[in-house]
Image (spheres, coloured by chain):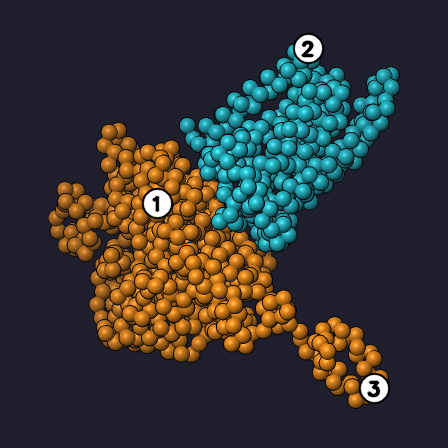
Amino acid sequence: MSPLLSILTSVLFWVTAMCLVAGVAIVGPRRLYGIGENLVPHLRESRREVAALLVVLAVSGVGRPALQSVSEVFGLRLTGAILALEGGFVAWLQGTFQSPRLTLYFSSIYVFGYAFLLVFPFLAYAALPKPTTLKRLIVAYTLNYAIGLVLYTVVLAYGPRNVMPDLVTSLLYTFNPNFQTLTGEVNVETNVFPSLHTSLSVTVAAFAALTREEYPAWTPIAWWLAGSVVVSTMYLGIHWLTDVVFGTALALGCVYAAYRYVDPTEEDAEPDEREAGPDEGDGGSEPGGGGSDSASSTV
Amino acid sequence: MTGPISRREALAGIGLAVGSAGCVGRARNIAGRDGSSQLVLEIRTTPADEDPNGIRIARALAENLSAVGVDARVETMNGTDLHRTVLLNHDFDVFVGQYTEVLPFDPDALYGLVYSGFAAEAGWQNPFGFTNLETDEHLEAQRIADGSDRDDAVAELLTDVCEKQPFTVVAFPDALAATRADRFVGWETGPPVSATGLFRMEYVDAEDDEDPVTLRLVTTDGRISENWNPIAAEYRRYGTFMSLLYDRLTVVDDGTVVPWLARSWEWHDPETLEIELRSSTWHDGEPLTADDVAFTYGFLRDTSMGNAETPVPASQFRGRGSIVESTTVVDDSTVRLRIGETGAEVTKRALQVPILPQHVWSDRAETATVGGFEFDLETTEALVIPNEEPVGSGPMRFVEATPGERVVFERNPDHFLARAGSADGDDGNSGGSTAEDEGWGSIPDAYRGKPSFDRLEVAVVGSDVEAVQWVADGHADGTVSNLGPDSVPRIGRESGVRLVSTRSAAFYYVGYNARRAPLSNPRFRGIVASLVDKATLVDDAFAGYAQPAGNPLAASPEWVPEDLRWDDERGEDPVYPFHGTDGSVDVEATRESLRDIGYRFDESDRLLAREQ
């Protein structure tokens, strides 16, 4: 089996297993059962948002080599500037806390925990009777990826493990070199600013906080996982503190935008108005959809 | 005066000063002077994933420069990007790189590196912009001389170059490879990173009759999966795989010249060499003739073939190509190279350029365009084309590639190595009178019937650690990119993987842009050189797998005069010993040396330089 296939298989296995356990424990068997009947109408309701997300993912997947070339010739080289800005924070973090157990923990979090963190909300919010939260999540993901893609192209920077190997060990890849086969498929090494691991995790955490009444048990778990992912990006030597700060800001901005554009009146909506909600939502989501479209067409 | 007045304050004062007539001239004299600020030096190199050693050298140097008061910054960029900005655009202060030849090379290599006539050209020829009349004289002298005269001339040249430090040699790394011995042996007979090393590999796995036999290598350098242009400097590292695709007239094996595409040669007159070619065909079936050889030498000098206002030379092989002044085609298999006064030893180097097919490359002489627009008159299509579907005459030919992932080559059954059959002579092709006619005897036994694999697959991975893991997991037979301190110990922990270490001539160096002040000052470069702690770097950056060195010919010590050899006892460079002890720099002594040669520091001990 090729190295990529074997690592993909194990990620798929663990994410599925975690989703099943979390699905039963957090969403509950009754609501989980509801996904079956909710999913199709929810997705039909969010077809525009889903299409936008797919477009951004496709641009990211297909256009990456071209964007990378643009970045190499015209991009801002910020590696030196970031290092000058924050100095040896990541080196300090790793030097102070490094231990085999933490490396095992953070490596697993970075690969398996992160994948689970991204996938599970789809399941959880698809189980809700209304499509609004799912739609918002998709819009937020789309914005994260689209803005991330633009910034990746504009900024050319390498992470700490590539720049200061004397002080920062590439812990993830020395722990399991095959992980690099996986991450190499998903991204290139010059795309560190901002940290999309951070921004997507914080996005999920923010949604978990905003929907705590639906899934009270999910909130602390999501926060713990997201916090761990954020720390892991630096502990493993992959991202700078600067990437993480900007990633967090990006996440909060995207969540705000998603709530602003998808059913902004939802919170106060009366039960009988809920029927009209989706229509309003479609109208409200126009700017959001347009925003992500223009973001992807500028790159 | 109570203290220095900054330029800005002086400018602001002009308005007041003009009021009193006598002060006008004085104010202008002050404000008209450029001020000084802290010297900023950017050190460019590749990231750790691509090359684990270079970045460590750059970091250590930056740290020492900063300690002394220079604002030193490290900027990482991939190999293509580094070569583009440094070699082609000359847009750099300092860079850390590795020389391009793995096997010991002739001292004439320095001609390509530092001859002043190449300073304005784009490519590997004099990337430092170093210009010195005295050095030029030494370069010319060693070209003409032979025998012991040449030994002396080379010694003088080396002494001169070591003193003036157009670049600082740091260390000669061992060519390390993680290898498996279950399918192929012979890793240690030649570095697997060299073409001749690959020819010496033997297939051993007799258990399952594999057909075709595939040698699987793994590298961190993705450029071989994107570009196959043998003269494009941005995409070439050692040119190993290009040497498999493109034959040269001769190759060097263990210091001796082996007739390759040239079956034999003799002196036509003291200034002209007559070359007899082997019968050979290009990968597309066209015959290889003397016209192709003549074309190649002209093309390396001017890839525009006279179409551009000024010649546009190739960005590789410029130094050795310049040895040949002109060519004359005698017949299809005979060509005369006029080499002027050049001595016999240097002439051999002129025969080591890749021979290009005229019918493919003559169409690439026009000015390069993007979407029909001419961007830069100094570039031809030949220098920017990725050369997809490369047509060479070498023992391997291109099959397919996925950029950033892998590239596949296959054995060329029509190549003379294959036709020469195995050394035992049990191959039907090699018997009889043809052996006499085709001159197989001139090919060393070790190469006949080689390579011993039908396919060569090179996979591209993210880092040296991942490359080692691929070999450990059996996805590859060996690594062909540099291994660093994180990956070497891993080899020992994995069963079935062996560390193979061979000497390499591809030294690491710090290159200076002599076009920019203060790096144009040889005294300043000398002090920067003394901030490179070679002995400590060998221990830290190379995990001990390197030899510190002070001159570029340390891999062929017969050329190096006694007083330039690395002083093993004291463990320091003979010309510019490290300014410090046990890895830490002596800041005060270094500042004193800088003051001695005319540099100044401000009150916060920052080294001052003129604002550029």
Residue B439 in picture, x, y percent from top left: 18, 56
Please, what secondary structure does the residue beneath circle 3 have? loop
Residue B563 in which image quadrant? bottom left
Please, what secondary structure does the residue beneath circle 2 have? helix
Vertical placement of residue B105 versus A8, above or below? below
Please, what secondary structure does the residue beneath circle 1 have? strand
* Distance from Cα at disc 2 to Cα at disc 3: 93 Å
Q: Are marks 2 and 3 on the same chain?
A: no
* Upstream in sequence: badge 1 or badge 3: 3
Query: For the residue marked with disc 1, what is the amino acid?
Result: Ala
Quadrant for the N terminus of chain A, please.
top left
Q: Which residue is mark 2?
A: A30
Dot 1 surroundings within 10 Å: few (below 14), some, or many (20 or more)?
many
Give the residue displayed 14% in from the left and 44% down from the top: B424
* Res B177 label: 1
Residue B44 in picture, x, y percent from top left: 52, 57
Q: Which residue is mark 3?
A: B20
* Distance from Cα at disc 2 to Cα at disc 1: 58 Å
Residue A235 in picture, x, y percent from top left: 56, 39
* Distance from Cα at disc 1 to Cα at disc 3: 76 Å
User: What's the colour of chain B in the image?
Assistant: orange
Query: For the residue marked with disc 2, what is the amino acid?
Result: Arg
Q: Which chain is cyan?
A: A
Q: Are marks 2 and 1 on the same chain?
A: no
